[in-house]
Image: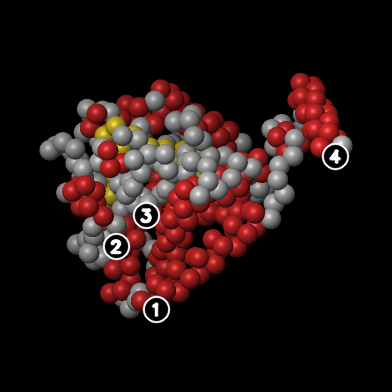
Amino acid sequence: MLAGFHPQFPYRSDAISPVRVLEPDGKLSEGRQSPLNDDQIMSALRLMMLSRAFDQRGVSLHRQGRFGTFSPVQGQEASVVGSALALDPSQDWVVPQYRELPALLHQGLPLENFILYFNGHPAGGAIPDGVRLLPIQISLAAQLPHAVGLAWGLQLQGMDGVVLTYFGDGASSEGDFHEACNLAGVVRAPVIFFLQNNGWAISTPRSRQSGARTLAERAPGYGFDGVVVDGNDLFAVYEVTKTAVDRARRGLGPTLIESQTYRLGAHNTSDDPTRYVDSDAANAWRELDPIVRVQRYLAVKGRWNEGTASDFESDNSRVIERALVAANDVPPPTTEDLFKHTYAELTVRQMRQLRAGTSSTTQREDSVGR
């Protein structure tokens, strides 16, 4: 089911154009309707704008030495939010990479937990009970076999849950991607491989990674469907992902979604994109900003204006400030914290390490006291 229309992105003249519902000017494509109602769109936009605002704060905190290396979502908000909205957090799972903050929030992860992770606090890696989410994965594609195993496990238990796993175009060049797809196709696992093709694997362009017309066209080789979608189109991403989720829930197996979006900035806070990104191309993609596209659509319907924008920005600022305060109020980690959330019961080796670490800490405290 490789179809759609998107003239800006093809890497080859014969590339298949992605599915699109909402045009950059905020108008619906001819013959299309929004798959979301106005209230759902407003909620989605609020989450997209919260993500953008947190990106700015996260980069600032990193520059101040108060945050670890951080990967902004800027430019990919529709890709992440549109796909996340297609899930039911009460039964579906998200297996993330490291650039999907809005999806983590939608699944129920508190923002302060995300902040703790980038503060280097062990508590930031713990997923609260009831939140169907695996931890952030920095190693490229390493989460994909886990996602398939999780989905297969749900299937074997007769559960209705679906797993959506995020990764980038660079990760799709790793062996873990191909092995995961192969197993998923064999067992018909209820998993959606959501490939965020943002044009770059750090500084390596998509054109240097694969000679394939599209990355989604790899899917039939593993026995399941692939689809290409305009990743800057909230409506299209939701529609395509919802179809994939419904298919997986009915036992029809995996789907590979290639969401063609663009990274409007650095790979992470240790990267300098001005050394390899053509400024004209970057500026052209800024004109396709996914947040502005939704705002234009709502403005035509009378649901968006300067006052509403100001309210959203103020509300998001308060949410971020509250989360920062909550994270800062968490006591510094102790030796014991390093061993929490590893196993249900500590192994003999861990117990030995814990006793040794606690003893060393006590000795240091005693020497300081003297």
Mark 1: few/some/many CA within 10 Å (<14, 14-19, 20+): few
Callout 2 amino acid: Arg
Residue at the image position 39 percent from the left and 78 percent from the top:
307
Q: On residue 293, which mark appears?
A: 2
Percent x, y for residue 110?
60, 54
* Between 23 and 66, the one nearer to me in the picture: 66
Tell me which residue sits at (26%, 65%) in the image.
26
Cα separation between marks 3 and 1: 23 Å
Q: Residue at x 55, y 44 (%)?
A: 118
Do the CB atoms of the residues marked 3 and 1 lie less than 8 Å apart? no
Alpha carbon separation for disc pair 2 and 3: 10 Å
Kindly identify the amino acid type of the residue bearing the numbered disc 3: Ala
**From this viewpoint, is residue 247 visible?**
no
Callout 1: SS: helix
- Crowdedness of circle 3 by 10 Å Cα count: few (<14), some, many (20+)? many
Earlier along the polypeptide chain: callout 4 or callout 1? 1
Q: Which mark is residue 369?
A: 4
Q: Which residue is mark 3?
A: 78
Q: Which residue is mark 1?
A: 307
Q: Secondary structure at mark 2?
A: helix
Q: How far across and down, in percent of the image, does residue 306 sit?
A: 36, 76
Where is residue 229? Give x, y as percent: 29, 47
